[in-house]
Image (spheres, grey):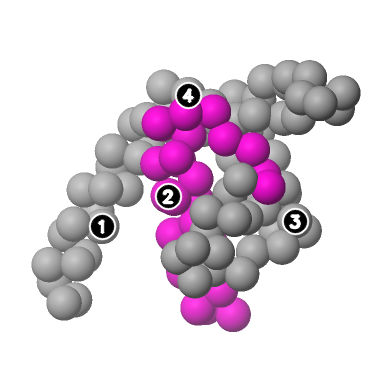
Amino acid sequence: MMIRDFFLGFIKIHILHHASKEPIYGAFLIEELAHHGYEISPGTIYPTLHSMEKSGYLHKEERLVHGKIRKYYVITDQGRVALKEAREKMKELVREVL
């Protein structure tokens, strides 16, 4: 369970990173994270996105894509601050642990 919690933290940082570059959506993140060895189900990614939105780190925008509504997420100012802090902590941790 502890390893799952660590990976979920890494995934949240990864989400913020991509949301800082461009609007993102769940299916994109599932594919992107798979490239990094994470097998994330829709049952994990969508609640994570909703939680991050509710916490103020992401903002949701709905767009019509091929006749369907797709929910895109973009980073907020609060998310940018959190990402900056996470990057600093990660650098410190990597230097110490590795």
Looking at marks 1 and 2 on the same chain, the residue that comes earlier in the sequence is marked by: 2
Q: What element carries label 3?
A: helix
Residues at marks 3 and 4, CA–CA distance in whole angstroms: 23 Å
Dot in front, 3 or 4? 3
Mark 3 or mark 4, earlier in chain: 3
Amino acid, disc 3: Pro
Q: Earlier in the sequence, mark 3 or mark 2?
A: 2
Separation of disc 1 and disc 3 at Cα? 26 Å
Asked if marks 1 and 2 touch (Cβ < 8 Å), the reply is yes
Locate the C terminus and report the quarter of the image it occupies: bottom left
- Identify which residue is drawn at 69% across, 40% down: 50
Q: What residue type is labelled 4?
A: Thr
How far apart are labels 1 and 2 at the CA level? Answer: 10 Å
Q: Mark 4 points at which residue?
A: 76
Q: Which of 74 and 36 is in front in this view?
A: 36
Residue shown at 52%/54% (left/top)? 32
Q: Can residue 51 be seen in this view?
A: no
Find the distance from the CA under tag 4 to the CA under tag 2: 14 Å
Q: Give the range drawn in magenta.
A: 1-27
The secondary structure making up most of the magenta span is helix
What is the secondary structure assignment of the residue under circle 4? loop
Q: Which of marks 4 and 1 is nearer the N terminus?
A: 4
Which SS class for mark 2? helix
- From the top left corner, tell me how far across and down residue 82 is, in percent: 37, 38
Q: In the picture shown, does residue 20 fall above or below 47?
A: above
Q: Which residue is drawn at 73% across and 21% down?
A: 62
Q: Mark 2 points at which residue?
A: 13
In this view, the mark in front (3 or 2): 3
6 or 75: nearer the viewer: 75
- Report the residue marked by disc 3: 42
